[in-house]
Amino acid sequence: MSLATALILLPLLGAALLAALPRVAPLLNIAISAACLVLALLLLAGPLPYGEGWLRADALSVSLVVLAGIVGLGTAIFSWRDIEGEGFDTARTRFYHAAFQGFMATHFLALLSDNLGIMWVAIEAGTLACVLMVGLHRTPAAIEAAWKFFILCGFGIALALFGIIVLALAAAPHLPHGDLRLSAAALREIAPLAEPGLLNLAFVFLLVGFGTKAGLVPLHSWLPDAHAEGPTPIAAVLSGLLLNSAMLGILRGEAIVAAHPGSWAPGGFLIGMGVASLLLAGVTLWRRRDAKRLFGWSSIEHMGIAAIAFGLGGPAGNMAGILHLWGHSLLKSAAFFAIGRAARLKGGQRMDQIGGLARSHPALGWGLVLVMVGLAGLPPASLFASEWMLAVALGREAPWLLLPYVLGLLVAALALLHAMQRLCLGPPTPDAAPGPAGWATLAPIWCNLALAVILAIALPAPLRALLRDAAQVLG
């Protein structure tokens, strides 16, 4: 059995065990997630691209798999204590742990699949698992958010399927074997021979379809509700993992279409949606009164920045985009861990209910301060490095984009710093449930924060080489 296959089957087996063994589910969830991270790291030891057939890992997919392993383990550790406080009955607790590992299996499959049809199925299955988990509280708001998530993303993913079918039709005259017509690698090789009109049409459907799931404006409206109403660990995996797999679907389509010299330049579409996401999110962040919705809108902002980077393309743009996905996933999952625990301690997630965290709970509060400083794009976290790299690349390749880009960054950064001051540095609000933050909350926050800083100031040589190779995969 290959490492890639084991990485998909292990969480799938884990989901069955977690459903059958609810008493040890939290610790077993952590053990399975740790084993998945080890398998993901072992993928780095072999030559890339790795595997053949439906599963084929290249530097881009492996970089996202390792990131998923890190975020998945942190989320499993946080879930250990957090899910106890959600007030779920035994059946819902059992379902949560099983669905979490089920989602991880589909996420690894989406990242490692060379077959676009299987990638689509995996993303759709992962979405369904998340929809069910978002609705676990069974409140009217949670059920409405789950339905909105299901309907909008279901519509989007249907358009993405149509885009994949059009790609297969474009490849049909040049790829006699049916399986190869859905292979991303094979489609990219024969793209210069394909009909450019079909390639253009396919990319429009792929961008709209996967863009809905990636939370790009104007297809983003499901995202803040789903982040605010679901259990906190699900908000972390939605922002830290699901958005990345959707962006990977867009990037696979962009690489295929861009290989034909007569097709439209797909980067312009990505840049347009990215700028719209950055500007709208930057303005909307000022109006948030719910802390989880605030971070949901922050995810829209950062996916917009990544879309601008990938749309610009080239070694610098693609490197900035991949580094941005890493930094965003690490910091945003840490932000949800911190605000989820703060909401539990303060008795609500409205921003006027949470205040003075740095005084009342120093380890939790200062962790949230540093995470929000990083999300604002300030040093020393990696988002500062990726945003600076993108600014330099824009100045060289498309200087007319610098004004909206810098304006969007400034508006969003000031809004996040203003919110950080209200949440962490003001007078403390009373605790509704006095108690410590707990190491199961603090460890994932501070570990993710440390990794985000290391990415910016001391990126290890092997990881630097992996991210550089991942950028080259995109061309």
Image: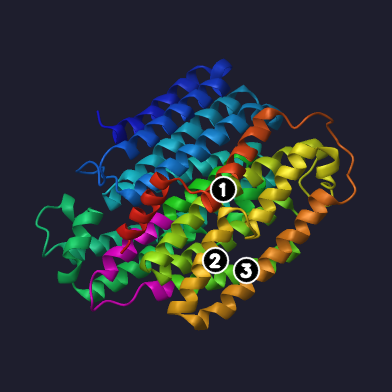
> Can residue 144 be spotted in the picture?
no
- The amino acid on which the numbered mark 2 sits, given as a three-letter code, is Trp
Where residue 294 appears, as percent x and y from the top left, is: 69, 56
**In the drawing, what numbered circle is on residue 452?**
1
Q: Position of residue 354 (x, y in %)?
A: 82, 46
In the drawing, does residue 344 fall left or right of residue 277? Answer: right
Other-residue count near label 3 (Cα within 10 Å), few / some / many at <14 / 14–19 / ≥20: many
User: For mark 2, does the 10 Å Cα neighbourhood hold few (<14), some (14 to 19), or many (20 or more) residues?
Assistant: some
In whole angstroms, how far apart are the C-alphas of marks 2 and 1? 15 Å
Q: Residue at x 55, y 64 (%)?
A: 387
Work out which quarter of the rendered image holds the C terminus and state it. bottom left
Task: Residue under label 2, please give it.
Answer: 388
**Which stretch did the figure color magenta?**
247-269
In the visual, does 52 lie left or right of 243? Answer: left
Decide: is 261 above or below 219: below
Q: Quadrant of residue 262?
A: bottom left
Residue 409 is tagged as 3
Three-letter residue code for mark 3: Leu
Residue 438 in sight from this viewpoint: yes
Q: Residue at x 45, y 45 (%)?
A: 460
Which comes before the other along the chain, label 1 or label 3?
3
